[in-house]
Amino acid sequence: MTYQVVSVNHPRDRETFLRLPHMIYAGDPNWVAPVTSEVRRTLDVRRNPYFKNASLQLFLCLAGDEPVSRLALVINKLNQDGCGAPTAFFGFFEAKNDPEAMKALIREAEDFCWHHGVRVLEGPFNPNHYSELGIQADRFGTPPAFFQTFNPSYYGPLLEQEGFHVAASFQTMKNDDIGPYLLERYGPPADIPARDGYVVRSFRPRERALELERIREVNNEAFDGNWHFLPLSREEYVFSAKYLSLVTEPELIQIVEHRGRPVAVLHCVLDINPLLRRLKGRVGPFKYVRFMSDRRKVRNLIIFTVAIKKAYQHSRVYYYLLQAFRRLAAGYRSAETTWLSPENLPALKAAESLGMVPDKHFAIYAKSLKP
């Protein structure tokens, strides 16, 4: 078999790049097709403000005339200091179980990286640290929750055969009976008193622009210094939050203020993946109406982020967030986290206090490059 790796520059190749997952997962009842228009928007370097400081190159591997694997390469010079060596991130990785195709794809990516001064290749990030990330490492054949990656069991071995190793591991945690569990353990949720200048409130849709800026401010300060974290610009956060109202409700975003200033945010979203699965990657007016109607029935909740400004991380704010979550989770069947680092002991302990147990594990792979 003859393999050819092409740089995706022509619109026809870009469409093949976008369609490849549909070929790989055809017939898989658990796979949730990403909305193609949203992937296209994310990878548009002219529209996505993240690429003001980063470059993007897409690669597609063909076996004869058949597309068999793909990946995106992102080089962001703002990440270089935190990575310890010139690093590129790979993402949007999809592949058929073809080791020779994988070898051709990775060699082309490595050559590109080396000639651009990169010495470490790491991922997957789709396309950065605040997007979907990692290779699913266990519980294959089970449906993904919203914001989880999904892949066959052979993805990890394919990367390892090309010299990649696991550089970081994460897990999600879940409680399949969240409402009754919280009621039994903590009793009925109590009102949160406003005292000593603290107020807990829901997201205000009428102040959307201001609210997004308040959340961005809290996140940037709370996560500063975390692994691979870069502060989000205002433009980046607005871009990423374009469809916020489709995945959450105002009461699922709780903001703690102290003397009128935001100091913490609990951001939950709905697990809309069962609804997205029916869309099969495409949207339209009738599908939108049905999506919004069915979304009211979603009873699975995802804790997307919990952010507390550093000066308040050992204060009563934690109690306020717990109380806020108990109130909003009372009407839901299950709740789970997005990925948690095994080193983040406070977050793991908080999840355990909600009756959550480990669910799925994900891995970030890295490789040191040679000429």
Image (cartoon, helix red, strand yellow):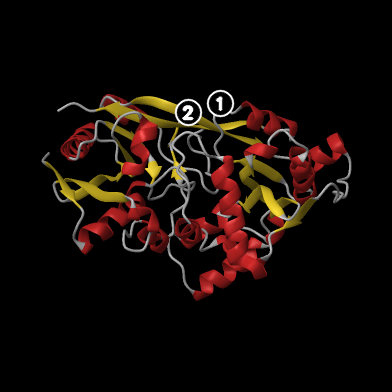
Pointer 1 or 2: first along the chain: 2
Quadrant of residue 364 within the rendered picture: top left
User: Residue 207 versus residue 342: which sits nearer the camera?
Assistant: 207
Left or right placement of residue 18 versus residue 194 in this view = left
As shown in the figure, which amino acid type bears the numbered disc 1?
Pro
- Picture coordinates of residue 242, whole percent (x, y): 51, 63
- Dot 1 falls on a residue whose secondary structure is loop
User: Residue 254 versus residue 23: which sits nearer the camera?
Assistant: 254
Q: Please tell me the numbered disc located at residue 342.
A: 1
Q: Are marks 1 and 2 in contact (CB under 8 Å)?
A: yes
User: Residue 93 versus residue 279: which sits nearer the camera?
Assistant: 93
Q: Is residue 38 positioned above or below 342 on the image? A: below
Q: On the image, numbered disc 2 is attached to which residue?
A: 169
Callout 1 crowding tier (Cα within 10 Å): few <14, some 14–19, many ≥20: few
Residue under the image location 84 percent in, 46 percent down: 196
- Picture coordinates of residue 277, whole percent (x, y): 50, 56
User: Residue 361 versus residue 276: which sits nearer the camera?
Assistant: 361
As shown in the figure, which amino acid type bears the numbered disc 2?
Ser
Q: Is residue 254 visible?
A: no
The quarter of the image holding the C terminus is: top left
Q: Is residue 161 positioned above or below 9 on the image? A: above
Residue under the image location 38 percent in, 61 percent down: 41
Quadrant of residue 44 within the rendered picture: bottom left
Q: Is residue 251 visible?
A: yes
- Dot 2 falls on a residue whose secondary structure is strand
Left or right placement of residue 3 versus residue 179 in this view = left
- Picture coordinates of residue 54, whole percent (x, y): 31, 49
Left or right placement of residue 304 versus residue 327 in this view = left
